[in-house]
Amino acid sequence: SDASGSAWLRSSLVSMDEPAQIPNDENGDVLRRMLGNGDDLSKPRMIDFCYVFPERRQVLAFAELVNGRELEVCISYNEERHMWDAIVKRYMVPTHQGITAFELTLASQAESVGGEADGWGCFVQKDKKR
């Protein structure tokens, strides 16, 4: 997250804009907010999918379940929350369908070993024409 918080968007943000092509749900809210900030949603970028676990063995079991050579899994202990964090990084175009499907797959894997989803985020890719 940067100091201003404007380049890093989390799925807890709410948007003012409502383009008709984006579903009206939490992921849709984030994508509309990104569009409103001048993000070019046609550009692929690294997207971080975040999950939390009470115990180290759970986060390690999750990392074993996540497969795919195109994925990177980062594990760390969050001192503030006294929880283990897993961030699954995937390079992709931020489409509602793609993000939602991948997020649901990972959430199911996380829940199967005692974890839970903690949102997703990415850095803004500005449209050069604006």
Image (tube, rainbow, N blue to C red):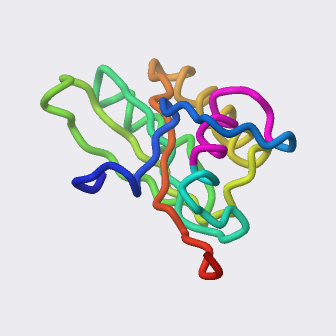
Most distant residue in the bottom direction: 128
Q: Residue at x 79, y 43 (%)?
A: 19
24 relative to 96, above or below:
above
Residue 101 on image: x %, y %? 75, 39
Most distant residue in the left direction: 79
Residue 39 in the figure: left or right of residue 115: right
- The part of the image, by quadrant, that contains residue 21 is top right
Residue 114 in the figure: left or right of residue 81: right
Magenta span of residues: 22-33
- Judge by depth and name the residue closer to the eye, 114 or 42: 42
Q: Residue at x 36, y 25 (%)?
A: 53
Residue 39 on image: x %, y %? 59, 62
Magenta region includes residue 64: no
Q: Residue at x 45, y 23 (%)?
A: 115
63 relative to 129, above or below:
above
- Judge by depth and name the residue closer to the eye, 61 or 35: 35
Task: For the C terminus, give its image quadrant.
Answer: bottom right
Residue 125 on image: x %, y %? 54, 69
Q: Residue at x 39, y 41 (%)?
A: 86
